[in-house]
Image (cartoon, grey):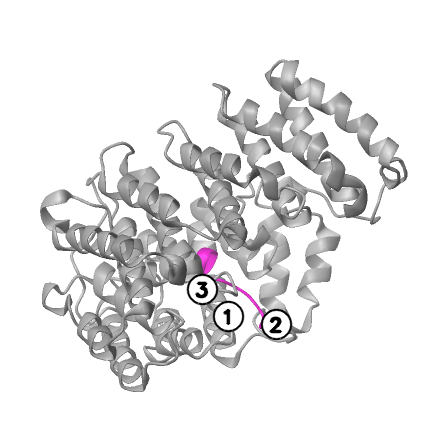
Amino acid sequence: MYRKKCEHIEILKTDKGVKTLVEVVQAAIMHGNVQVRTEAAFCFKYILDFAPPANIKKEVIKICGALIRVVNDKFPQELKLQIFHTLKLIQINAAQAAKGMQAQLQTTFLKAIGDPQSNLHTRKVIIENLILLIKGVPRIDAIIKELNALVEGPKIDGESKIEVSELLALIIRAKGKAIQSAMSQTVYKAMTQILSDQAKSGTNDKILANCACAIAFLSAYASDAGQVQALFTAFDEMDINCISIPLKFGILINGNEAVDKSSMAKEFESFLIEKLVDQAGFQEIDDDPAPIAGGEEEVFRFKGVLDLLGHVADKFCRRDWCQAPDSTYVKLLFSCISKAEIFKKLKAEESIGADSYKLLNQFLAHVPVKTPANAAQFTPESTQVYAEGLECIQAFYLDHDALNQNTCDTLLNMLQLNYDNFLQVDDPQFLKKELVKETLQKPHLKDIFSDDMALYTMDILFKKMH
């Protein structure tokens, strides 16, 4: 992690300089020990980031080939993670030059996402790589087929299936039009079966939410608007929040604007507000609390509707191409949270339990904190939710000193200093007081951080972290 202070490094401004460095780094990543190979992957990132595009394009195939060969071998995840970061940078900075490697990249990414040994951080970067890759790939049925098989099959465990099902949904959302009809039907059948069998299969809630969104995104290409309406209520009788809420919201944000969704939007609004009032997840204020989830049970369960919304928003409203911060339905989502008055009621409590404080932070640490394109402020709907959430943090953080890291996670997200939640910040020491002070002065953050909370933020991040 670094902040660029110059656009290009002198030695990389010439073809000869780039070629010389690439040859040295290539030898290191192909023949060095694990530490040397990892450092070589970092060096490739710097070369790709600081060389002019015109100078790097001649070396891209050579770099790609070396990286693919190493990452497909049996090396630690730490090395593979840095290689996937480098491949991501190639696709961002030199996609055209790497076009000849698309088939090899596709095979590499699919093998890695289905690797039982992969870890969370690696899978997250692979997701971004595949999303970048499909932009230039005309046919994606092979990718969809592989991801669908991983989700419904036994090859990978439930933890891995969370990211794989998320990726499947995102690719459908990004390029579902390119999926052949037969493959769409195969995916629809598989996802429907997973949702219908949830009780006996023991599928965790995040996978169910992702599969529900996958079906919803597929419905964007239904030929009959009546089919979309039927799907909107198809799972209502099951009354399972982690299916019905993502399904309904997914249909609203699936990108099909040819279907009149006004009645579905009104139905969703009243449905979601009622769910939030009854089962947000806070035992102190819920009108009709659901059974406490996630205790001794090994399978992940959301701890209320707010926890579920944090997941759905994080995965499917964070990328502007999937849903922009000022879109009608993202604003509707935030509006529902405000109208349910969850945070107002919570703040009115004299105290809240540790579970409730964890849930509060879980939502605030994962919900997207983004300003619309070409806008300096958050939307009014999101501003209200962020501000009221931070007021609750201010009211209760001193009572939960043992959960200080949870509070820090929230503040890093609200300050937009956690790399848009794509990368986990393992070491908060990279933060400097000057950076946080400067960030807190931004007008859009002044709208959500009170003067007192700004002071407390400095105290929490820099005094209580040690």
- Whether residue 52 appears in this view of the structure is no
- Whether residue 35 appears in this view of the structure is yes
State which quarter of the image contains the C terminus: top right
Disc 2 target residue: 373
Closer to the N terminus: mark 3 or mark 1? 3
Please tell me how many numbered marks the rendered image carries: 3
Image quarter of residue 456? bottom right
Q: Amino acid at mark 3?
A: Cys
Q: What stretch of residues is rendered in magenta?
A: 364-373
Q: Is residue 105 above or below residue 39?
A: below
Closer to the N terminus: mark 1 or mark 2? 1
- Residue 186 spot, x, y in % from top left: 23, 52
Label of residue 324 in the image: 1
**Marks 2 and 3, how far apart in space?**
14 Å
Q: Please give the name of the residue rendered at 49% of the width and 66% of the height, measured from the top-left corner.
A: 390
Label of residue 317 in the image: 3
Image quarter of residue 162? top left
The question of residue 206 being in magenta is answered with no
Q: Amino acid at mark 2?
A: Ala
> Mark 1: which secondary structure?
loop
Image quarter of residue 181? bottom left
State which quarter of the image contains the N terminus: top right
